[in-house]
Amino acid sequence: MPEITVRVKTWPSHGLHVRTPRYLRGKRGVIERELGRFPNPEQLAYGLPAPERKLVRVRFTMAEVWGAGAENPDDTLDAEIYEHWLEADEG
């Protein structure tokens, strides 16, 4: 399977129940694997109809997440993020 690079969207989320960590927004990572489809928890939190969305595990390097201040830049962090928070990374 070819490596798929994505970027986490930077949508505003003031006052919303968001499951995507703020520190990962705008960061690039690689899809490590797909985890399945689940009801969108951002809508479930408000008792709204929650269509199923694909959940994927995305791997980020510490250099990408923390920049020049990363203590171990090649170490990685994995996060489970719903597909609607991801966009293809063009470079």
Image (cartoon, grey):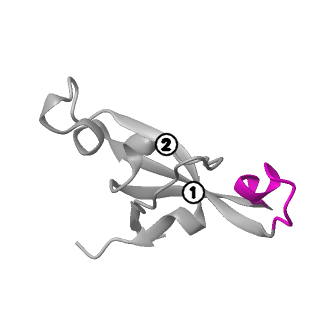
Q: Secondary structure at mark 2?
A: loop
The residues colored magenta run 39-50
Q: Position of residue 22 (x, y in %)?
A: 44, 44
Q: Amino acid at mark 1?
A: Arg
Q: Is residue 40 magenta?
A: yes
Q: Quadrant of residue 64?
A: top left
Q: Which residue is mark 1?
A: 33
Q: Which residue is mark 2?
A: 21
Q: Position of residue 66 (x, y in %)?
A: 25, 36
Q: Nearer the viewer, residue 7 or 58?
A: 7
How crowded is the residue under tag 1: few (<14 C-alpha within 10 Å), some, or many (20+)?
few
Whether residue 54 is visible here, answered yes or no, is yes
Q: Amino acid at mark 2?
A: Pro
Above-or-below relation of 1 to 78: below
Q: Secondary structure at mark 1?
A: strand
Q: Is residue 34 magenta?
A: no
